[in-house]
Amino acid sequence: MRTSKAMVVSCAFVLLALLAGCGKVFFFSFRNEQALFNDEVAWDISGQGSYEFLPSGISLDDKALLCPYAFKGDVTIRIRLGLGFTGDEVGQLFLLVSNEPIWSPSAFHMLTFAVADPSVQGVSLIEKGDDYTLHKIITGLVPGIIKEGENSLEMVKKGDHYKFTLNGTLLGEYDAQQYLAAWFFVQIKGQLGLATDAASMVIEEFRAVSSGGMQEL
């Protein structure tokens, strides 16, 4: 009997620990929804370009998506991204954590990478507060990228530390110096070059896990 009670108590503690570590989750599949909305939320979209839905998700060309939730505290964001760059086509992706739900915010942390031939490719990690800080720049081939296929882009924010990976390969990490985010917004922008008719940049899925809370816009 004593052993049985001990096992029950032990299992209860394990369950509580698991629940405490889960955080709040927001998941949206552009592939499944084939829309910017479902019965629960709606994404905003801005920019002068265009977008279209393909069977795998939403294709962006000079358009920015605004996540329908603001986040607080530690957050892990994972984006499933389909790329179709078979030659020298040019494309660029932007991921922003910002202080305002607009495309040109006054403060942000940004990852951007360019997909093209090796002479044009590269990665930049930029922070904007009162000034701009270039935390990292990589020239040449984007580490870990799959130019023709599915990619997993991840941002992990713990306190004021930011870490970015692509398909498990580290792109860069740094401690914030200017913009110390409390509640913040998430934006994703895709941009294709003028002569890239054959290229595609498709956002398939978005997932965010927040330990500090979420608030619908």
Image: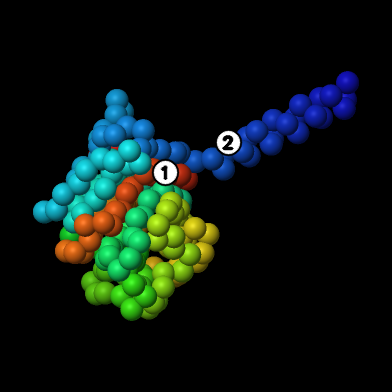
Q: Quadrant of the C terminus?
A: top left
Q: Residue at x 42, y 53 (%)?
A: 149
Q: Quadrant of the N terminus?
A: top right
Q: For the residue marked with disc 1, what is the amino acid? A: Arg
Q: Which label is found at residue 19?
A: 2
Circle 2 crowding by C-alpha within 10 Å: few under 14, some 14–19, many from 20: few
Q: Position of residue 141 (x, y in %)?
A: 41, 73
* Amino acid on which the number 2 mark rests in the picture: Leu
Nearer the observer, 201 or 71: 201
The x, y position of residue 177, in whole percent, is: 36, 71
Q: Tell me if 156 is positioned left or right of 105 in this view.
A: right
Q: Nearer the viewer, residue 172 or 61?
A: 61
Q: CA distance from mark 1 to mark 2?
A: 18 Å
The disc placed on residue 78 is none
The residue at the point 51 percent across, 64 percent down is: 169
* Residue that sits furthest to the top in the current view: 1
- Which of discs 1 and 2 lies nearer the camera? The answer is 1
For the residues labelled 1 and 2, say whether their Cβ atoms are less than 8 Å apart: no
Q: Image height check: is 82 above or below 118?
A: above
Image: 86 above or below 209: below
Label 1 neighbourhood size at 10 Å, few (<14), some (14-19), many (20+)?
some
Q: Mark 1 falls on what kind of element? A: strand
- The residue that label 1 is drawn on is 207
Question: In the picture provided, is 18 more to the left or to the right than 139?
Answer: right
